[in-house]
Amino acid sequence: METRKPKQKWERTNVTNLVRNGQSGVYYARVRASDKENWKSLKTSTLSVAKLRLADFERTLRSTGTFATAESQRGEDLTVGRFMATYQAQTAADPSLAPATKSRRIIALKAVRKTWPDLAGRDIRRITAKDCQTWAARALREGTGFVAPNARTTRQGMSASAFNKCLETLQGVFRLACDEGSAYGNPAASVARAKLKAKRLSLPTPEKFQAMARAVAEAGSRQSRDCADMVRLLAYSGLRLREATALCWRNVDWDKKLLAVPGTKTAGSLRHIPLFPPLAALLKEMRDDREEASAESPILRVRECKGALRSACDAVGIGKMTHHDLRHLFATMCIQSKVDIPTVARWLGHSDGGALAMRTYGHFQHEHSQREAQKVTFGLSAS
């Protein structure tokens, strides 16, 4: 690498940091770094090749953290904090993001600030992959230091799911700098996502579920019937809690036997699921009881039923269930009814073709297959 300007006749090009020798026609890189101009022959007179080699040269300088962009020469703020603020503002203003997604991103951004206290004040060009890996190890080991008042156990470090959300947010912040041209490469891209521990589902039989739903309805409180409606609707549809509470009667198409489900992860999205026989019967029963309800009236009259669900589980002697476990119950019943996993995944609103559903429910499919296999005897008695 040469560090002083050759005494030649130079021609400017329309490419930043690229000049051409007027006599030989060879292109040179002229890049300012460490308060001096760095010159390098790109050893080509072909513009397209010169551009590629210029990018390689700039990449080398950027990797050392000494590359001086036009923005930095003008004194523009290149701290990570400025890009964090931009990321938060863009998240809040993005109409395609659902409120829950926006909330998760803001929470993750706060967690990144807490687990990496000096990050906001640092020059974003000088953050390395090793810095990000050090943060990741510390976050997984120590976490945010926050312990919920009602927590039964003390967690050591950040949970895998919380860490992955923080990592996605951190990568998003650095991506803004890359898009702006203030940084080269995304140092957080080298950090691996934390491996989620597979939850072994323990779900009730259909008989136990019906007993639990009756226990919710007969609990004796003012909203017991409404809570029972929620329990059954979640189990019969596989909807997420926010999706279920967003339903109005206009979402039910009785003629086509479809339920239009408003998206909660992407604002404005909509998917349609069939009116499965138990779901259709439940909705008809609820609609007959509410003849005065308009098309815009919510189908469910409660926003959650955690307490009722917990008490009913205790009453019928089954393990604790959550709203989301009712979604798992729906998927399990579908698979045990021989519905293929890609179809179940579409009903659940997954966009990965069934990959997540296979990881979550694949063992149920295997267990069902093994039970069915015992029926294939060729007339021979079982040994």
Image (cartoon, grey):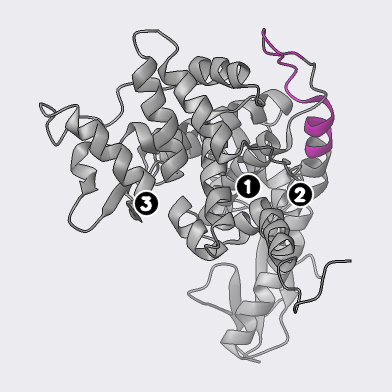
Q: Is residue 151 shown in magenta? A: yes
Q: Find residue 163 and report its horizontal and vertical position in percent.
A: 70, 36
Taking the image as shown, residue 179 lies to the left or right of residue 90, namely right
Q: Secondary structure at mark 2?
A: loop
Q: Which amino acid, mark 3?
A: Phe
Q: Which mark is residue 276?
A: 3
User: Relative to the observer, which residue lies in front, 71 or 115?
Assistant: 115
In the image, residue 365 above or below residue 285: below
For label 2, the residue is: 191
Taking the image as shown, residue 53 lies to the left or right of residue 291, namely right
Q: Which amino acid, mark 2?
A: Val
Badge 1 or badge 3: first in the primary sequence: 1
Q: Is residue 192 shown in magenta? A: no
Q: Find residue 381 and report its horizontal and vertical position in percent.
A: 82, 70
Q: At 32% across and 38% down in the image, what residue appears?
A: 282
- Can residue 6 be seen in the rendering of this structure? no
Q: At 17% across and 27% down in the image, what residue appears?
A: 290
Q: Secondary structure at mark 1?
A: helix
Q: Quadrant of the C terminus?
A: bottom right
Marks 2 and 1 sit apart, C-alpha to C-alpha, by 9 Å
- Can residue 382 be seen in the rendering of this structure? yes
Q: Which mark is residue 171?
A: 1
Marks 3 and 2 sit apart, C-alpha to C-alpha, by 43 Å
Q: Secondary structure at mark 3?
A: loop
Q: At 12% across and 29% down in the image, what residue appears?
A: 291
Question: Where is residue 121, by image quadrant?
Answer: top right
Badge 3 or badge 2: first in the primary sequence: 2
Badge 2 or badge 1: first in the primary sequence: 1
User: Relative to the observer, which residue lies in front, 242 or 123?
Assistant: 242
Magenta-tinted stretch: 136-152
- Within 10 Å of disc 3 (Cα), the crowding (few <14, some 14-19, many 20+) is some
